[in-house]
Image (cartoon, grey):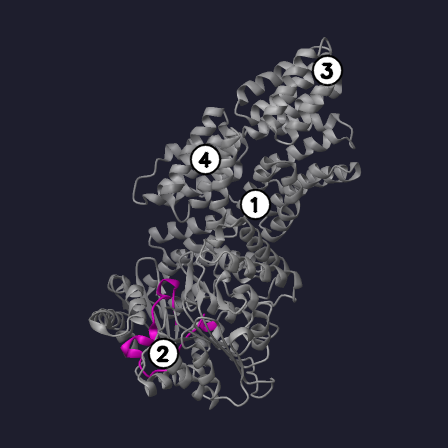
């Protein structure tokens, strides 16, 4: 017996809700042919068909069908309400937010409070609230819908509502809540259909983008756009392209411009004027960033801002108006106190840039400082190191605007303040150790097994690896609460705390110029350096260092050695000679450096030979931690612990030679050097040394790690160590490296240990020859065991052995 029109309509509704649009369209077409003279049922069929048409790229026909259905005479009030709701949803997807809100509200007010139909329309209206940034209204609608779904036992729409509640949290700046809700909802949504999973992933990519994890966000957005394209969901594909363009905006404006233009054309062809204006706004900003010297087409900005406002996207209209103000003296638009944090940061940035262009550096500094203080208050809600460092993305332009203005003042106090702001950006929030998480430990163990199974392949491309990496990161984000705000030292306080023997060399990179504030107990001065000369010497430095470490004898070794010596002497002359002259009597040095100088092997510069020095994460951290007591020797079961991973040519010899300097040192080699044993050892000693092959993960440095007997000890494993050692020695290829995050931030394994509580990490930013590491670090431990501070021990060992190597102290080496 053939299905009735009513049964076919329900089948079409179910298929549409599961994003099986081809199946829905066939069922609805058959239902329409069988409906007879039931006007209400025909109108409902047409309303559902309109939704399907809108989702598959025919929004104009969808709107026409909805409005025709509403004009049918004699319809019941409930049918009229549902049709208004469907029309409102169409208008919402088309970016006509004010009209959508009116239609949806009319429908919601006419439906029973406990009905699933009303709950569904509350969901649609919540999206309108999101896009208008009316988050209180949005959240109220979602909670009302959730109550209905829970009462009716409707699991799939309940998961979608909770996911959307996460999206509202994202818009409010609560990234952790957003990710938790979206992650919890995804399995239910993914079980519904592949397209439902894609829609979930689209929103999740926005969280990653706002968290500064743009590499992962953009890979996910590319994948989602392809999936939408395969299903001919042109609107959804355009939305994925739009968000991809927004992510590219800060670090690849040329690609952002092309991607946004493509999305704008796609929306325009669909009649989605509001979305087209959103994409055009991104294209305009990308064009300014890609070609900063060109004249601003204020007419294009004004037209696009008006189109955004007309569509109800008032927050984005304000953001575009701010962008257009960068190049002129037009009146600044008013920013509401509850506006999104990135928009408020953008307003401070525009004020700083405009003031600088007008020669008002004091005003530029105030605007930039106010913006960075706002960013810090946002960062305080995050405890995880990678999240704190990543959201610094939102302060990049503010920081460079402040640094440039500070440099122009030539005032040591001002430049020192801004150097500390730059170094302190992801350290302003004091670290909070997470509670021990057995599930996190299990996920890391599984990840180790997968990495071993996929040896030789691109293990990060494996879907299981990606899922586990996501889960590890999200567990870490969720388990660490907000920390207290660290103090930032000014120059007078620093001068008061500094001893006679120490000089601080605070290097500052403004994006164009390089300077150094030299601080001694006697005072401070600013030294201007030649960034072009430094940049020229840096080109090819890493390659020379790597080849020198791996080349043993022969004519090639002499050629490489000469090239490397030339580069090191050029860097020494450009970076250090004039700076050292400003502090001639200091016997030890504390350096703070921008991320762009992070790959320099400072210990190999001729001018630093024999001088104890440390690379401090910030002066505020260095001198502030001096108030904390060091652990007394002998308070742990073993003063020193050592471990060697597999396939390190002289690794076992290295750790045993180094351990011989200590009485009763514990050593793990071979099969005993397993992750659990090594992390347990690290939690019981004052000095911890590991010799292992390692790899620095550029995309997420917390997945950098050491290769041990049973797999990789990741950066995330460090936070599972109950008590970190005072001093850590990393004799591992590349694990002294760091990734420059958003211009100023550098993040790598050294920072992971320092964030976890270790005072000093000895590591190299490049490969070190095994024989050099073995002999030099053995001499370092002899001095450490005699009570020398790490920086003193390292300098003395280098002189006594005659070995020049890139090992250097990070943190407090004194």
The label number, if any, that marks residue 771 in the structure image: 2
Q: Of label 1 and label 4, which has the lower sequence position?
A: 1
Residue visible at 40% across and 43% down?
Answer: 325
The label number, if any, that marks residue 279 in the structure image: 4
Q: Of label 3 and label 1, which has the lower sequence position?
A: 3
Q: Of label 3 and label 4, which has the lower sequence position?
A: 3
Mark 3–mark 4 Cα distance, whole angstroms, equals: 47 Å
Circles 2 and 4 in contact, beta carbons < 8 Å: no
Q: Is residue 601 magenta?
A: yes
Circles 1 and 4 in contact, beta carbons < 8 Å: no
Q: Which residue is mark 3?
A: 2
Q: Secondary structure at mark 1?
A: helix
Q: Of label 1 and label 2, which has the lower sequence position?
A: 1
In-image side of 92 versus 623 (left or right): right
Taking depth in this image into account, of 17 and 210 the one nearest to the observer is 17
The label number, if any, that marks residue 204 in the structure image: 1
Q: Is residue 616 magenta?
A: yes
Disc 2 versus disc 4: nearer the observer = 2
List x then y, in percent, for residue 510: 35, 60
Disc 1 versus disc 2: nearer the observer = 2
Taking depth in this image into account, of 589 and 602 the one nearest to the observer is 602
Label 4 Cα crowd, 10 Å radius (few <14 / some 14-19 / many 20+)? many
The label number, if any, that marks residue 21 in the structure image: none
Q: Secondary structure at mark 4?
A: helix
Label 2 Cα crowd, 10 Å radius (few <14 / some 14-19 / many 20+)? some
Q: Which residues are magenta?
A: 592-620
């Amino acid at each position: 017996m053939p299905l009735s029109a009513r049964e076919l309509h329900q089948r079409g509704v179910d298929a549409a809700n599961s994003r099986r649009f081809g199946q829905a369209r066939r069922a609805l077409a058959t239902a329409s042919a069988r409906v007879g003279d039931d006007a209400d049922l025909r109108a409902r069929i047409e309303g559902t068909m309109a939704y399907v048409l809108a989702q598959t790229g025919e929004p104009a026909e969808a709107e026409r069908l909805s409005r025709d259905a509403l004009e049918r005479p004699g319809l019941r009030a409930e049918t009229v309400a549902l049709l208004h709701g469907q029309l409102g949803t169409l208008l919402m997807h088309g970016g006509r937010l004010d009209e959508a809100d009116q239609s949806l509200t009319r429908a919601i007010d006419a439906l029973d409070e406990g009905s699933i139909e009303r709950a569904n329309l509350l969901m649609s209206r919540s999206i309108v609230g999101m896009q208008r940034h009316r988050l209180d209204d949005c959240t109220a609608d979602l909670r009302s819908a959730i109550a209905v779904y829970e009462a009716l036992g409707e699991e799939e729409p309940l998961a979608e509502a909770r996911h959307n509640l996460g999206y509202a949290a994202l818009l409010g700046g609560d990234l952790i809540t957003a990710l938790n809700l979206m992650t919890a909802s995804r399995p239910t949504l993914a079980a519904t259909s592949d397209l439902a999973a894609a829609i979930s992933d689209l929103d999740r990519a926005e969280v990653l983008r706002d968290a500064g994890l743009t590499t992962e966000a953009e890979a996910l957005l590319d994948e989602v756009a392809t999936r939408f394209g395969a299903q001919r969901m042109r609107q959804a594909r355009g939305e994925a392209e739009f968000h991809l363009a927004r992510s590219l905006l800060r670090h690849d404006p040329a690609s952002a411009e092309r991607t946004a233009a493509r999305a704008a054309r796609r929306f325009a062809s669909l009649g989605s004027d509001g979305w087209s204006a959103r994409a055009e706004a991104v294209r305009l900003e990308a064009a300014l960033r890609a070609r900063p010297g060109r004249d601003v087409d204020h007419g294009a900005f004004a037209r696009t801002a008006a189109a955004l406002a007309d569509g109800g996207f008032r927050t984005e209209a304000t953001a575009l108006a701010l962008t257009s103000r960068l190049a002129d003296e037009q009146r600044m638009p008013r920013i509401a106190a509850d506006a999104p944090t990135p928009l408020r940061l953008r307003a401070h940035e525009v004020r700083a840039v405009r003031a600088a262009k007008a020669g008002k550096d004091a005003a530029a500094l105030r605007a930039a400082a106010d913006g960075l203080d706002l960013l810090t208050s946002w960062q305080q809600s995050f405890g995880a190191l990678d999240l704190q460092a990543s959201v610094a993305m939102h302060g990049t332009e503010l920081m460079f605007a402040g640094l440039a203005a500070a440099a122009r003042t030539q005032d040591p106090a001002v430049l020192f303040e801004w150097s500390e702001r730059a170094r302190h950006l992801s350290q302003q929030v004091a670290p909070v150790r997470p509670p021990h998480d057995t599930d996190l430990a299990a996920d890391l163990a599984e990840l180790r097994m997968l990495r071993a199974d996929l040896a030789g392949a691109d293990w990060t491309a494996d879907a299981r690896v990606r899922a586990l990496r996501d889960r590890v990161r999200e567990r870490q984000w969720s388990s660490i609460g907000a920390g207290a705000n660290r103090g930032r030292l000014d120059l007078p306080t620093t001068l008061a705390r500094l001893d006679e023997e120490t000089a601080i060399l605070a290097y500052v990179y403004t994006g164009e110029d390089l300077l150094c504030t030299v601080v001694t107990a006697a005072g401070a001065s600013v030294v201007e350096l030649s960034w072009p000369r430094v940049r020229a010497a840096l080109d090819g430095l890493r390659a020379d260092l790597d080849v020198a470490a791996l080349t043993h004898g022969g004519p090639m070794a002499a050629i490489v050695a000469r090239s490397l010596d030339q580069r090191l002497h050029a860097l020494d002359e450009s970076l250090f000679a004039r700076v050292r002259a400003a502090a001639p009597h200091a016997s030890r040095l504390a350096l703070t450096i921008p991320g762009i100088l992070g790959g320099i092997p400072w210990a190999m510069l001729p001018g630093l030979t024999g001088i104890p020095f440390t690379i401090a994460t910030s002066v505020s951290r260095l001198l502030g931690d001096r108030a904390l007591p060091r652990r007394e020797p002998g308070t742990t079961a073993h003063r020193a612990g050592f471990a060697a991973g597999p396939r390190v040519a002289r690794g076992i010899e290295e750790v045993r030679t180094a351990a011989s300097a200590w009485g009763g040192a514990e050593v793990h080699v071979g099969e005993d050097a397993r992750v659990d044993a090594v992390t347990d050892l690290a939690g019981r000693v004052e000095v911890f040394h590991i010799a292992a092959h390692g790899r620095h993960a550029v995309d997420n440095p917390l997945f950098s790690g050491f290769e041990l007997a049973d797999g990789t000890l990741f950066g995330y494993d460090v936070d599972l160590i109950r008590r970190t050692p005072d001093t850590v020695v990393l004799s591992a290829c590349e694990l002294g490296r760091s990734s420059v995050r958003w211009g100023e931030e550098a993040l790598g394994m050294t920072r992971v240990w320092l964030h976890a509580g270790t005072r000093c990490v000895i590591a190299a930013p490049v490969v070190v020859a095994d024989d050099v590491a073995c002999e030099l670090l053995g001499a370092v431990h002899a001095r450490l065991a005699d009570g020398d501070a790490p920086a003193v021990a390292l300098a003395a060992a280098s002189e006594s052995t005659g070995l020049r190597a890139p090992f250097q102290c990070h943190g407090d080496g004194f």
